[in-house]
Amino acid sequence: MRATSQLLVHDQLLLITLFLLSVQTTAASGARDRFEKGQNLTDGDTLVSPDGSFTLGFFSPGASTKRYLGIWFSVSNDTVCWVANRDQPLPDKSGMLVFDDLSSLVLVDGSRRTVWSPNFMAASAAVVQLLDSGNLVVHNGSSSAALWQSFDHPTDTLLPDMKLGKDLWTGAEWQLTAWRSADDPSPGDYRRTLETKGLPDIVLWQGDVKRYRTGPWNGLYFNGVPEVTAYADKYTLRATTSPWEVTYGYTAKPGAPLTRVVVNYTGDVERLMWDAGTRAWKPLFKGPRDQCDTYARCGPFGLCDPEAASSGFCGCVVGFSRPAAAGTPSQSAQEVNDTAADGCRRDAALDCAGGATTDGFAVVRRVKLPDTQNASVDMNVTLEGCRARCFADCSCRAYAAADIRGGGDGTGCVMWADAIVDLRLVDRGQDLYLRLSKSEFDDQKEFPTLLVVAPVASGVIVLLVVSLIWWRRKRRIIGAIPQNPAMAVPSVNLSIIKDVTGNFSESNIIGQGGFSIIYKGLLPEGRMIAVKRLKQSALTTKGKKDFGREVEVMAGLRHGNLVRLLAYCNEGKERILIYEHMQNKSLNVYIFGIPKLRALLSWTRRLELLHGIAHGVAYLHGGSGESVIHRDIKPGNILLDDEWKPKIADFGTAKLFVVDQAGPDQTIVVSPGYAAPEYARRGDMTLKCDVYSFGVVLLETISGERNGGLHRLLSHAWELWEQNRTMELLDTAVVPLAKSEPELLSELKRCIQIGLLCVQETPCERPTMSTVVAMLTSTASQIDRPRRPVLDSGGVVQPSNSSHGLETDLLSPTTIDLT
Ligand SMILES: *[C@@H]1O[C@H](CO)[C@@H](O)[C@H](O)[C@H]1NC(C)=O
Ligand SMILES: *[C@@H]1O[C@H](CO)[C@@H](O)[C@H](O)[C@H]1NC(C)=O
Ligand SMILES: *[C@@H]1O[C@H](CO)[C@@H](O)[C@H](O)[C@H]1NC(C)=O
Ligand SMILES: *[C@@H]1O[C@H](CO)[C@@H](O)[C@H](O)[C@H]1NC(C)=O
Ligand SMILES: *[C@@H]1O[C@H](CO)[C@@H](O)[C@H](O)[C@H]1NC(C)=O
Ligand SMILES: *[C@@H]1O[C@H](CO)[C@@H](O)[C@H](O)[C@H]1NC(C)=O
Ligand SMILES: *[C@@H]1O[C@H](CO)[C@@H](O)[C@H](O)[C@H]1NC(C)=O
């Protein structure tokens, strides 16, 4: 540490705190919070902050016997938040922290050799003191300015009032560095820094490689982590950009529980909150959350969709496509992977030279904005002004608002001149405006020619309506023989679909993923339909070929709890599915939503939803006479109609995106959190995998908590169930108005037990879906006692030896025997 460090900006807050503390005497407990020149702290001795929250002393981490000087949370003495001598451990307990005659603070070993010493200007009246914030400060007697403070030298933990970033005067940088292992606090591979070029953005590094970004600061929070809004009432985030510093930090509101952000030696970044009730740390956030958080996962101009596990997550932004999608069948998995990393290519060249251009902008909705490291930022311009600037500058590839505090579309301007990297879809994400060739827009403008021949067009619509009516009648007749679905769903012309969706008008988009865009469409009779347009760039060659066959299978499946396929289009390069339109979006919107949305689902409604979903899955599993594995049951695939009746969507489409080739290195990816362990480990896909996913959906619907890649919810639910504390699992937004407490409690307990049975480790211990339906509907039926669920990280599947199992599992026909 250089002597100039005293120039580091000192918060006024710190001055006030110090002043108050110097007036106050040391803690009532008798433990001291400070010592002065000539005094010392030996191993076994501690300093305790005045309110008792933090303790400074000597410790041995994990299994190690080496001694370190550090600060820990007094309530949780194995949670160390700062270490002085990270890479100079003491061999034994003979170490001592002492203020020597030269007024410097030194940590010495048994033979009085200096092991560690903070660098500050010697002061005659120097005092070292541990504050309530967990900050160890050295100051000069009653003088308020700190000569040195541990908050300027973070290790792996960020506490309230600390900061990350750069001091632009001294060039000093505050960053977090993970421990090497649980037993070794020396600096490990992972670092977390504030990217200060472009917009502030927190980056997790492994060595010199970027691993994960939070997304740029948008005035309120980091754009890729909207989860913070859930705890904004307790902890306030702030980013500071001034001529002196670019920093990020957070503060805790008075009375908020203890909290910390830590970079684990495993490469995870976690925010935790101390739960005084259970005396344990409760995770509030953990990143990277999923595959899409992996930095630049889909390459330049790629778009990662975390909901699209079956297709390997990667698609392209509009106007770009991935060469692999049109790849030849002989392409190896290796090549597919390499191309994926290379990203996407522009479909039509831009036209911009000497200030004249015919290009336009397309909007990519709800994303974590790309890396802004090389982007230019101007906060003093409106979004309209930003658009004009980007338009006039041929090197500008995309732009977005830099500040969303004012609401609306935001203000400020960030412009990208090179590749767009690390783009993903995120709940409540921001809009990115992408420069594209005029021809990308012309394509959609061919539509007006249809309007010119309006009589013809409406004639065609009449035909569509007639065919729908015809089909509905016919369905009634053939309803009894669903095994023969071949003729059940009409194929409609692309021109009709263009007509009812306003030529795929942006204003009609109701949903979007990496692999499809869903539009609402209005039939002349006033009925709404949902038009799912599969992205050509995401479909595999086999997927395109199999489309017709899959449609037939889907059409044969009809049940009140399945979304009904009304028609499809298989014309040229287009693959489109037309479904009934669902008023109330999907289950995830409510169970993981803001309290107001959660409260819409009462306990009774949640129970009804689960009954409906169970019936739907049971039907897929055999009720139709055929047996179909859904493969991707999750709340996002459970749609809700205007009467809150659940309808399962996307059965059968997952396979259209599965990579064709099963090479030796093939990687299959599954939705973390919902994948059964045997599928995650070996790729074994059976009906029992759906049962597992259903169990997760059940527990999520009750608790309002995501299971996530760590399957933490499962063990949490098991523990509460086992300890007869089931009420604690119920989402607090549920107001049990209609039911008496004991009745609700017994329903809740039974329901959780069923959910836990569904997520048993061994497939044969899980009930079949028809048994689940029976257990849910009749309280008379006996339920087995579940065993503790086994934790599994899910995520990427790496088959152990040959690809044989995979090939048969993933590429088998939709229908399998019920054995
Ligand atoms: C440490 O402090 C104690 C009392 O505060 C004193 O008795 C002892 O001599 C000191 N040790 C050294 C090595 O300064
Ligand atoms: C930490 O706390 C536990 C109990 O809370 C106690 O048994 C243990 O001795 C403490 N360890 C240290 C190093 O103070
Ligand atoms: C520390 O305080 C003393 C008197 O209180 C003063 O003489 C001395 O200059 C101060 N030293 C520094 C480095 O501030
Ligand atoms: C790091 O993660 C491991 C495994 O999840 C956990 O046991 C450990 O407590 C974590 N360490 C920190 C410093 O959070
Ligand atoms: C920014 O530019 C540098 C130098 O050209 C390059 O190495 C880096 O990859 C770029 N970063 C991004 C996110 O494009
Ligand atoms: C911001 O823009 C306004 C008007 O466009 C101008 O008057 C003002 O000086 C600008 N401020 C900065 C800091 O550039
Ligand atoms: C695919 O790429 C990732 C990262 O670029 C790499 O870790 C992985 O081993 C590659 N897989 C194959 C099959 O080449």
Image: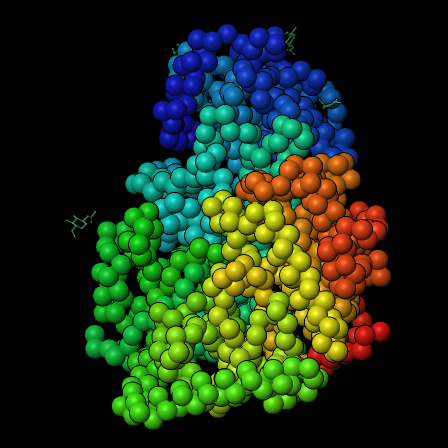
In the depicted structure, whether residue 109 falls above or below residue 192 = above
Query: Do we see residue 183 in this rendering?
Result: no
At 31% across and 71% down in the image, what residue appears?
A: 361
Q: Quadrant of ligand 3?
A: top left
Quarter of the image containing the C terminus?
A: bottom right
**Viewer-side residue, 519 vs 356:** 519
Residue 102 rendering spot, x and y as whole percentages: 51, 15
The image's colour scheme reads rainbow
In the depicted structure, whether residue 58 falls above or below residue 524 = above
Which quarter of the figure has residue 51? Answer: top right
At 81% across and 74% down in the image, what residue appears?
A: 818
Residue 787 rendering spot, x and y as whole percentages: 82, 48
Which quarter of the figure has residue 654? Answer: bottom right
Residue 290 placement, left or right of 524: right
- Report the number of numbered marks: 0
At 54% across and 15% down in the image, what residue appears?
A: 50
**Viewer-side residue, 661 vs 677:** 677
In the depicted structure, whether residue 31 falls above or below residue 81 = above
Residue 437 rendering spot, x and y as whole percentages: 33, 79
